[in-house]
Amino acid sequence: MTFNNSPMIGEVIRLTPNGAVIRPEGLATNRGNFAHNSCFLHGKAEVGAVVEFTPYRTPNRRHLALNVRVLTVEQVEARRCLG
């Protein structure tokens, strides 16, 4: 499986109902379908959640997978301050 439409390493995005994502600076990106599907299929996030993607190798090291971490409001604000 390839992740051509996947979020960038460490990218923080917000999920929207149609599967699009909006970066913190407000620019839309075409990475939304993958982010939307992976989050909702695995029940990790809901619409409006701000999430961060971190890649990792599966145990057999043949496939790249993505961890999805839902960020709290405090974490999002802290990242904005760090800029």
Image (spheres, helix red, strand yellow):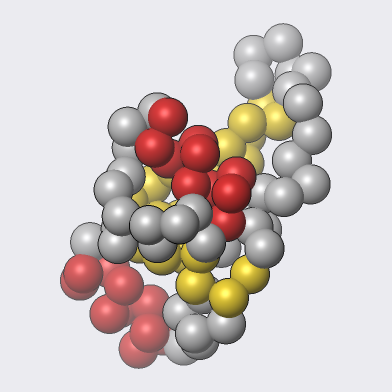
Query: Where on the picture, by quarter, is residue 63?
Result: top right
Please state if 19 lies on the left or on the right of 48 as rendered.
right
In percent of width and height, residue 62 lies at 79, 18
**Snapshot quadrant of residue 57:** top right
Residue under the point 63% across and 31% down: 65
Tell me: 43 left or right of 52: left
Residue 75, how many percent across, how many down? Answer: 28, 68
Name which residue lies at 20% across and 71% down.
74
Dividing the image into 4 quarters, which one contains the N terminus?
top right
Judge from the rendering whether residue 31 lies leftward or rightward of residue 46; answer left or right. right
The residue sitting at the front extreme is: 18
Relative to residue 3, is residue 42 depicted above or below? above
Number of labelled discs? 0
Asked whether residue 12 appears in the rendered view, the answer is no
Q: Residue at x 71, y 30 (%)?
A: 64
Q: In terms of depth relative to the viewer, which is nearer, 78 or 20? A: 20
Position of residue 43 measured from the top left corner of the image (x, y, whole percent): 32, 32
Residue 27 locus on image (x, y percent): 57, 82
Front residue of this view, candidates 78 and 49 = 49
**Vertical relation: 35 (above or below) 22:** above
Please tell me which residue is depicted at 32% across the width and 45% down the height of the picture.
45
Is 18 displayed left or right of 7 in the figure? left
Q: Residue furthest top?
A: 60
Residue 11 makes an appearance in the image: yes
Q: Please, is residue 33 above or below residue 81 in the view?
A: above
